[in-house]
Amino acid sequence: MGKRHSHELFGSNPPHAAVSVLTILPNIPSIEVGKPQKLRAIMKPNETTQAAKWSVSQGNATITTSGLVTGVSAGTVTFVATNSDGIEGSIEVTVAAPSTWTRSNQSYVHNIEKGGVIYVTDIVSSNYDLVSVAVGIQNSNSKWLSGYPKHGTIDGKKCELKPLDNSIAFRNLSVGAGYRYVITATNSNTAVNPNGDSHTWVKTFAVKPDSTYYPTLQHGSSGDAVTALQYLLNANGANPTLDPDGDFGGKTQTAVISFQSGHSLTANGVVENPTWTSLISSAEIIAIADAAVKIALEVALYLLSVFGINSADEQTQMRYIWDYLTDSTKKFRLTSVQAAGVMGNLQAEGDFSPTNAQDYNQPPYPNYLGRDNPEYISKYDIHDGIGWGIAQWTYYTRKQGLLNYIQDHGGSLGDMDTQLGYLYQELTTDYSGMWGKIQNSSSISDVTVLWMMDYEGPQDKSQSAQNTRIANANSIYNKLFGT
């Protein structure tokens, strides 16, 4: 049997069953000469990756057995994939002449949180030789901050930083706007750049308050988070020095109240976000000149990372989302009934956790169990079929949409505010019809089912599944309404 194009499997009157189509992704309109691009073959509608034989039907380009394509000269190229059933898929791509300068979107930061990090690998690339680079941060008066700019070189072809640090931490930046992230690059190949012209990219960004979720601790708490707290209290001069034993007893409570009193915090002995952030920022200042405090700070931050400072307990995150959805000064402005219906679904999907990766055990991904899987962020792949975050975005266009939102608005993949912002963007664009109905509804069950069917679209749409989400919504309403 000869090769079959996926669109030719059936005649002009295909059956009602979904037709299998071999699609090549990503759907790129163009590539540059000499700049490799990885393609993959996906069978729709079940979104399975296909082992394929790759070829070039027209144009001057190369393609490896794994789908890595490289344009040889400018023009139009058609790449073809054929799976084991003989079904073909193809994509036509324009090969453009090489540009002297390109930049990574990753380097164009929009906003960061206080204490955040901007990663500057892939700052700027050139298809020619080495690039001399200066990178750094300026304040609103265009003055370089202490220690910047940093200078170094990048191998243009590999786009790797050499003497430069691979990240810049900004814990010393105050909350506010007007900072400038500046990159100046010069191609050192005089044949290409005989005049030594420099190219500068500037992006203004703001520093937002730290929105990290820290665990709430009080007298009687225990565990790694308490040990971290005790190290931080010692770093801030607790007297007497605490034994970091992980038990929140009377001495720890006294030290907390003392610290809170001295830092204009509510002195109630309960450790929440304001106390955590004050403890950390104060210790960071002391650690500059005190090696022992620096060690204590590092131990505390390590323990908190293990405990999961970005993975608040379900009750804290549920309350945060409820307040966000019902706050009349924010975007959603939902009634309590509407918010409960939405959250009944969010509980069923991501259990209110922005770092919830759908349970999965296929190589190369581990089995993500539980509601918090921040380790998935480094493996985030729009095509892997793993649901992510509070709404369990799974389909590749929606996972790519989250990346696009971060590029346009700042934030990060595991950040609650970022995901709520992307949620609102989807609702007011692709799902605006459903969104209008929800805004006009006064029924918890109607909102719950509408959201489930038209926005989430889970595999299980049975009446039993609907009842579970409605029960979630009613429980949330009864727990949070009026509190």
Image (spheres, rainbow, N blue to C red):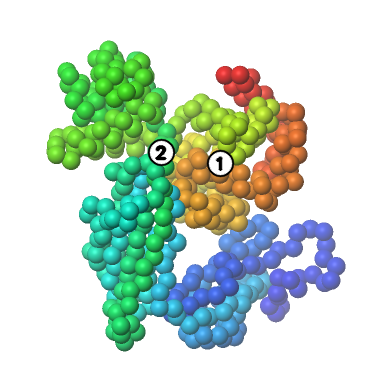
Q: Quadrant of the N terminus?
A: bottom right
The residue lying toward the viewer, choosing from 102 and 315, is 102
Q: CA distance from mark 2 to mark 1?
A: 17 Å
List the single residue furthest toward the front.
141
Q: Quadrant of residue 183?
A: bottom left
- 388 in relation to 15, above or below: above
Residue 153 horizontal/vertical position (percent): 26, 69
Give me the residue at 20% from left, 30% from top: 235
- Circle 1 residue: 420
Q: Quadrant of the C terminus?
A: top right
Q: Quadrant of residue 134?
A: bottom left
Which circle's residue, 2 or 1, is located before the other in the chain? 2
Helix or strand or loop: what does disc 1 sit on?
Answer: helix
Mark 2: amino acid: Pro
List the single residue furthest toward the right.
13
- 87 in relation to 330, above or below: below
- Circle 2 residue: 209
Q: Residues within 10 Å of mark 1 (few under 14, many from 20)?
A: many
Q: How many marks?
A: 2
Give me the residue at 60% from left, 44% from top: 423
- 141 in relation to 19, above or below: above
Mark 1: amino acid: Leu
Residue 44 horizontal/vertical position (percent): 67, 61
Q: In the image, which disc is placed on residue 164? A: none
Q: Residues within 10 Å of mark 2 (few under 14, many from 20)?
A: few
List the single residue furthest toward the top.
250
Task: Tell me: 135 left or right of 314.
Answer: left
Q: Quadrant of residue 288?
A: top left
- The reply to whether discs 2 and 1 touch (Cβ–Cβ < 8 Å) is no
Helix or strand or loop: what does disc 2 sit on?
Answer: loop
Give me the residue at 63% from left, 34% from top: 333
